[in-house]
Amino acid sequence: MKDFWKLFSSFFTVALRRQMAYRGTYFAGIIGQWISNGATFLGIYIMVSSFDLLGGWNGSEVLMLFGLSVMSYAIGASFFFNFATGLAGRIRSGEFDASLTKPVHPFLHEVFSAGYNVGYISHFTLSLFIVIVALSSVSYTPDAQGVLFLITAVFGAALIQAAALIASSVLSFFSVGRNPIIDFLLVDMKEFTNYPITIFPRGIQFVLTFILPFAFMNFYPAAALLGKAIPEGYPAILPYLSPLAGAVVFALSILLWNWGLKNYKSTGS
Amino acid sequence: MSFIEVTGLCKDYRIAKQEKGITGAVKSLFHREYTVKEAVRNVSFSLEKGEVVGYIGPNGAGKSTTIKMLSGVLLPTSGVAKTGDIIPYENRKENAKRIGVVFGQRSQLYWDLPISDTFDLYESLYSVPRERFRQNCNFFTELLDMGDFLHQPVRQLSLGQKMKANIAIALLHDPEVLYLDEPTIGLDVTSKKVLRDALKNINTQRNTTIILTTHDMDDIEAVCQRLIMIDQGQKLFDGTLGDFRSKYNDGFTVKLEFDTVPPPWQENGEYELLEGDERHWLIKSKTEMTAKTAMIDLIGIYDPMNLYVQEERIEDIVRRAYAVDEVV
């Protein structure tokens, strides 16, 4: 464990130094992200504020969903985005093989050397702003318990986002190029959670809760915080289980990755 | 028992075929068709500690695949590889501490940072005592003549400088074995020489076992005592450089260059015209003669403006060697 932190801090420092070598690009990137996410934010805001209620959720409450989704993505992606999107290229170029000649687990080595992506600070700050705006406009009075709940829920949500990124990279072990089916399951399915899942058919609610549990990223924590109904017949404990759901899917995604690696080592494809 | 033992090593690659479009994407999730390529076929050899071995063969012969199995990257389809008392692909981490690997032109450096930063990173990656690590950094910086560019961002470095740095970082943790996949590819003559001298030095001073794959016969001549040749996954030759030359080398070719239209080619039993245009001829002797005799002879007959003697390229030797063994 001591070694882990030593390794993490050395690689983290290197990642920061690399990105700070291009400060201009870095700040331009942050502003770009603000504009692009800000536009999505405005789009959703205008849409939801023109309806009165969406499945019992008002505009600000729906924005809370978007805010939590972006915030958890910012955290998960800052650690895993470079890794997940870069893996296919590193396998193709042969750089990945070098990771297998290092005395640490290749997953750790890949994640660390792909580097922490500082750019997601822009997503994070924007999402924090959205969440605060949304909560204050529904006159939510923060208390210690609520804030603590939100922090652990966001942590669990970040693990879910990370798991989706890790799982999407596993395909690189099997074939070159992306698979649109996988992209749909791991990227596009998340879009549903920008809206309260109670407005969707029961099948989709089930998938987003038990199969690809993206609803734990934002819907369930927000429902708990704002006192909203969850799908009929679902256990009342669900809104509090985001950290657990996060830990489970994160662990599963690493198992899946190791399985992919095993295949790579024996087929070398 | 030898230090490195490879017995009946085989590696098949399965190459997946994926159909285009959505149906192809759906299908490929459930069922795939493969073509099988035998990259390494029943290769065996053993190495003593401190040996320097050249592993040669044309592109796609299975050199890199063998190195990957020895360094623990790939699992063999069948057969066994052992380094020290470890099976590298089963004890990958333990093996990784004892080996240094440089895979050809794939740099392990961060192109936007100076090499010195990558050095620091490697210190945290390998559990080497700090004092020893510093010593090694200084030793290899000196040996590979890297002092001038240690603190420059890697993107500003030449190919030769990057290769030196890659070799240095592969050695900082005192590995017992060094695997080099095409270390001199694309380098200029001076860099090649510095690199070869450094490898010899590392071998004698530290008794590091070195296995290098290469296309360049000069690499072999400069640093290797022994040569293993493979083609199409099979071992064709294993022995000293001298044995190799006397078994396969077919001498040399002579290139003549003319400034005017050359005199007519005289067919005889001694020389063969391999290629020729209006200004250049490529000639090979049919008999065993020294280069000196051929030069004097050819200048006498054709009076060219210029004359070069070329040793046979390794690819040609390997190609012919393969054809010879096929017949036998």
Image (tube, rainbow, N blue to C red):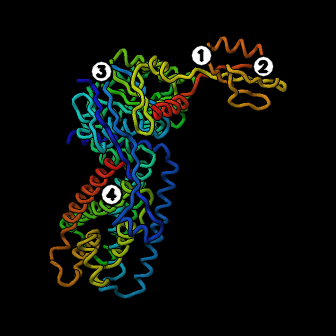
Tell me the CA gap for discs 3 and 1: 38 Å
Number of marks present in the image shown: 4
Residue A114, labelled with which disc? none
Nearest to N terminus: mark 2 or mark 1: 1
Residue B52 % position (x, y): 38, 21
The nearer-to-camera label among 4 and 3 is 3
Which numbered mark, 2 or 3, is in the foreground of this view? 2
Residue highlighted by disc 3: B49
Q: Position of residue A181 (x, y in %)?
A: 39, 69
Residue at (48% x, 51% y) in the render: A26
Which of marks 3 and 2 precedes in the sequence? Answer: 3
Q: Does label 1 lie on the same chain as label 2?
A: yes
> Reading the chain from its start, which is encountered first: label 3 or label 1?
3
Q: Quadrant of the N terminus of chain A?
A: top left
| Residue kind at label 3, given as amino acid type | Lys
Chain name for mark 1 = B
Circle 4: is it few (<14), some (14-19), or many (20+) Cα within 10 Å?
many
Task: Choose mark 3 or mark 1, whichever is in front.
Answer: 1
Q: Residues within 10 Å of mark 3 (few under 14, many from 20)?
A: some
Asked if residue B114 can be seen in this view, the reply is no
Q: Which mark is residue B304?
A: 2
Left or right: residue A254 compared with residue B155: left
Look at mark 1 in the image and give the residue it sits on. B288
Q: Identify the secondary structure beneath mark 1.
A: loop
In the figure, residue A208 lies in which quadrant?
A: bottom left
Secondary element under disc 4, as helix, strand or loop, is helix
Cα separation between marks 2 and 3? 51 Å
| Residue under numbered circle 4 | A166
Q: CA distance from mark 1 to mark 4?
A: 64 Å
